Image: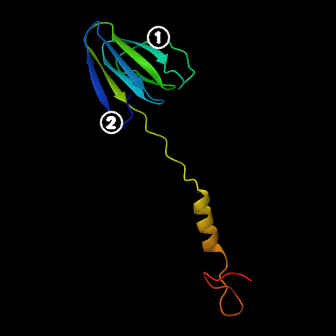
């Protein structure tokens, strides 16, 4: 499966087929003769059904989900440029330990006027 964020290009001769496993959001660009694109969903990853279509020179297609793609060169020489999707950015979520550290750091520190000092226990 293509997971890196690097463009790949595949040359196709007439009658040759290319099979790829794509992630959601990956883009295919047809360069040259028309190609037939057929899709099949990857099991347990996506619920979209498979379909078939023709891509002509300069047309692109974006994968709606994680799926298998078969590209068949219909006539003449062609090439397919594959741009994998950029992985989603991880959300910045605070864990319980981070939250505790933040709360301890924000808790008012009491000084000599009857306030608590750092590390001192309340009565």
Whether tag 1 and tag 2 are in contact, CB under 8 A, the answer is no
120 and 45: which one is in front? 120
The numbered mark, 1 or 2, whose residue comes first in the sequence reads 2
x then y, percent, for residue 120: 64, 83
Q: How many marks?
A: 2
Disc 2 marks which residue?
Answer: 6
Distance from disc 1 to disc 2, alpha carbons, whole Å, reads 26 Å
- SS of the residue at dot 1? strand
Query: What residue do we see at 35% from left, 27% from top?
Result: 82
x then y, percent, for residue 63: 47, 25
Task: State whether residue 5 is above or below residue 37.
Answer: below
Disc 1 marks which residue?
Answer: 52
Q: Quadrant of the C terminus?
A: bottom right
Residue 36 falls in which quadrant of the image?
top left
Q: Residues within 10 Å of mark 2 (few under 14, many from 20)?
A: few
Residue 38 falls in which quadrant of the image?
top left
Query: What residue do we see at 48% from left, 29% from top?
Result: 24
């Amino acid at each position: 499966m293509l997971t890196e964020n690097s463009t790949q290009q595949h040359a196709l001769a007439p009658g040759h087929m290319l099979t790829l496993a794509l992630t959601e959001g990956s883009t295919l660009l047809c360069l040259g003769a028309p190609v037939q694109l057929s899709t099949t969903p990857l099991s347990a990853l996506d619920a979209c059904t498979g379909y078939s279509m023709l891509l002509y020179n300069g047309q692109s297609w974006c994968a709606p989900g994680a799926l298998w793609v078969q590209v068949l060169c219909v006539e003449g020489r062609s090439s397919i440029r594959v741009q994998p999707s950029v992985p989603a950015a991880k959300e910045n979520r605070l864990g319980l330990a981070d939250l505790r550290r933040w709360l301890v750091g924000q808790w008012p520190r009491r000084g000599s006027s009857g306030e608590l000092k750092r590390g001192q226990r309340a009565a």
